[in-house]
Amino acid sequence: MKKFFTLAMIAIVSALPVMAQRHDYGYSTNNRYDYERSHSRWIRNYYGKDMYFGLRIGPAFSHVGGDAIDYAGSAKTGLHLGGVVGFEITNRAPVFFETGLSYVNKGGKSNNWTTSLSYIELPLVFKYIYYTDMGLSIHPLFGGYMAVGVDGNIKDYITKTKAGAFSKETKLGVPGFKRFDGGLRIGCGAGFSMFYLDLCYDIGLANISHSDYDSSSNGTFYLNFGVNF
């Protein structure tokens, strides 16, 4: 499922710019440079400037994969909340760089264990914003993220006890987690007027386990709702 979602998003990111180049907005698209310059100007007129601000909130469905603690097949639902800012990086095409800060609750669970890992995240993504005739905008995106853990615990359902997650050794006899996390982000958003929706998947590349022999990484699927200003 993870590989299918990743391949699907890559296909969307690759296809939409080509579709946009063939779209008719009432001016000639025979010259690629003229099209991209006009399309970018159209977007700047829509926002009123060449940058935007946004608010995001939604659920985050996460799991911890790897060898240290087995959460295979189990996902944990948490909260994602944050703000973003986007900058147009060229006046020849509607390509934006988006960053910001967000709070997200990740983790995972199995029959005996559950872990909650709360992070402050910094997204670093590129977006191609494509507008349709109906005022709907499509935002394929690709990039990465960096995060630092701010709170977390591991719970043993059998003993009904908890231990801090961000420590090298826990009181529950399982390895703890490192605070730093980072990886790739891929997804696609849609906007209408000031309203915004997107689906994203974070592929954790950092080993977050303190174990010297095992490794673990985060994987998180987001459904975000929000507004752009």
Image (cartoon, helix red, strand yellow):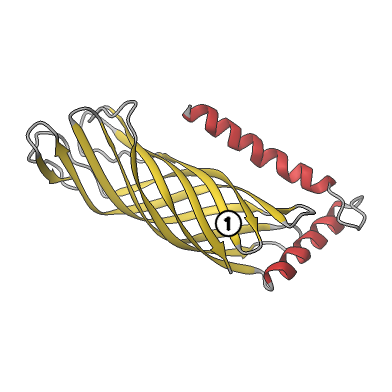
Tell me residue 93's x, y (percent): 74, 57
Q: Which of the 4 image quarters holds residue 188?
A: top right
Tell me residue 35's x, y (percent): 84, 56
Question: In the shown orientation, is residue 21 left or right of residue 160?
Answer: right
Q: In the rendered picture of this protein, how many numbered marks are placed on residues? A: 1
Question: In the shown orientation, is residue 164 left or right of residue 66?
Answer: left
Tell me residue 79's x, y (percent): 36, 51
Q: Quadrant of the C terminus?
A: bottom right
* Residue at screen point 75% across, 62% down: 40
Q: Give above or below for 89 relative to 190.
A: below
* Residue at screen point 67% across, 73% down: 49
Q: Which of the 4 image quarters holds residue 88?
A: bottom right
Q: Amino acid at mark 1?
A: Tyr
Q: Nearer the viewer, residue 38 or 200?
A: 200
Question: In the shown orientation, is residue 65 left or right of residue 96?
Answer: left
Q: What residue sits right under mark 1 in the picture? A: 196
* Residue at screen point 77% across, 64% down: 42
